[in-house]
Amino acid sequence: MEEPLLRLNGISKRFPGIKALDNVSMSIRAGEVHALIGENGAGKSTLVKILSGVFSASEGEIFLEGNRVAFKSPHESQLAGISAIHQEATMFPELTVTENIFMGHHLTSRGLVGWQSMEQRTRELLESLDITIDPKAKVKALSFAERQMVEIVKALSINTKIVIMDEPTSALTLREVEHLYKIVRQLIADGKAVIFISHKFEEIYDIADSYTVLRDGSWVGEGKVATSTVDQIVRLMVGRSLDQMYEKTEVVPGPVALKVDGLTRNGIFKDISFELRQGEILGFFGLVGAGRSEVMRVIFGIDRADGGEISIGGRKVEIRNPADAMRHGIALVPEDRQLQGAILTMNIRENMTLPIITNLARHRILRRGAENEITERYGDMLQIKSAGWEAPVNSLSGGNQQKVVIAKWLATNPRVLVLDEPTKGIDVGTKVAVHKFISELAARNIAVILVSSELPEILGMSDTVIVMHEGRITARISRADASPEKVMLAATATTAGHGGERPPQ
């Protein structure tokens, strides 16, 4: 067989007190998409940083096109033909697309920067990938998806051989994802290789040819995507089967905790009515634009309703702001944990006690002992992995950041907990832990609303499923009657047997 484009032999990486990678080997071939799979903390980021020249391996060898290489800097890695497109785009917003693409490797002629040549080259690269972006546009005016496209073009401008994509679809719409796939397939057709990192199995099966699985910093398996099942990959990742992902304790629901009647926000959603009981998990499902998160924002007082009523424990309440919602026992874990859920530069303790900080003060002086007690109680309960409660939240993995946000709102001792996409962007193992904890909350008689775009999660965790389409409720389905077909029919407002394509199952 021909020599792989990239081959890693026995790569290990040690930091003081921790071994982040232990004897990892893998091979990447030209013209293939290779998925790098693993939980948060499995070692994927460390491996990418070694390939990118950010870290040096403690042990092991890297071979590129059969030649042994060792990168001392990101610049050396780029010159060798390896480009990394990170989850958070790293560009200069005030500069143009052309300036960003050629940053660090300007085209020159007779000692002068060739702006016209660079702009023309940028235009050619954009057109080759069917990207309609003006080379003269400032990056700050681009959407998130467009910035990622510019990152890809930047990689191509230095004649890259291997493109590393770290969670590239995390903030993209379905249409943008399809465009990204088109670009990836074009890169492969041109003989390049793509290392694709994603927590979403549907993406791995859509775009990847082969895969390598890491667990706890070690290689645990590899194979061809076409001949491997999701259950096989999950077992490699977390040591458990797919059917163990949704550990739900059956609970007999109690009295009505929350009643919503005719809730309306003009132009967003209309006539939303439902009841939520103590100990019940009420799932909300819908496609993009269905209005699920917007309903939750009104219930929590972030936005104001134009009509309808909200009752807590059988008593009508007026919720004008989040403080009102919290006073009535409602807590919201928002979809975007980084922008809305946590203050990333603050430590775990400060984040976790922020909503109840006034309750922890005596004579306007914060009682540190009480604060530490709350932090330890909920930190241990959710098994948050960190260097200590004083560690900044931005030093944690995505899954542990999510646990901090959930713990923060649990500390308010809510009667109703709204979870908006609680497992978005976290790995399978952490999802299992979050699912188990949601079930435990319901068993403690907390009423839970679970908003999720993942149909298996909705079906696996909900006692009742409410489906929305374009701002209206189109179905209420009991757990016993819920099926992928029924839910998707309602989500697309399609009536079975009445024309049109059958929704996907």
Image (cartoon, helix red, strand yellow):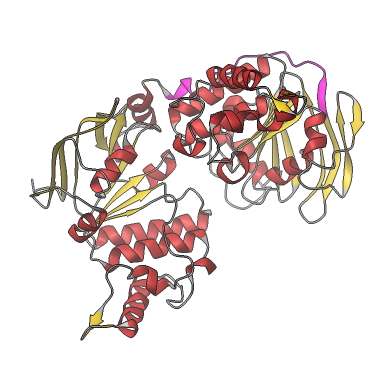
Q: Main secondary structure of the magenta part?
A: loop
Question: Which is nearer the eye, 155 or 242?
Answer: 155
**Magenta residues (range):** 242-258
Question: Which is nearer the eye, 61 or 247?
Answer: 61
Where residue 321 appears, as percent x and y from the top left, is 81, 42
Where residue 164 appears, as percent x and y from the top left, is 31, 51
Q: Residue at x 29, y 67 (%)?
A: 104
**In the rendered image, is residue 188 in sight?**
yes
Residue furthest to the right: 316
Where residue 493 appears, as percent x and y from the top left, is 69, 47
- Drawn side of residue 213 relative to residue 99, left or right: left
Task: Count numbered badges in the picture.
Answer: 0
- Drawn side of residue 2 relative to residue 49, left or right: left
Query: Considering only vertical position in the picture, is 500 above or below 226?
Result: below
Choose top left, top right, bottom left or bottom right for residue 148: bottom left
Q: Is residue 453 magenta?
A: no
* Quadrant of the drawing holding the N terminus: top left
Q: Is residue 249 magenta?
A: yes
Choose top left, top right, bottom left or bottom right for residue 463: top right
Query: Considering only vertical position in the picture, is 98 above or below 434?
Result: below
Q: Residue at x 42, y 62 (%)?
A: 91
Q: Residue at x 42, y 70 (%)?
A: 131
- Drawn side of residue 78 relative to residue 294, left or right: left
Query: Considering only vertical position in the picture, is 228 above or below 298?
Result: above
Question: Which is nearer the eye, 332 or 247?
Answer: 332
**In the rendered image, is residue 496 in sight?**
no
Where residue 234 appears, as percent x and y from the top left, is 38, 28
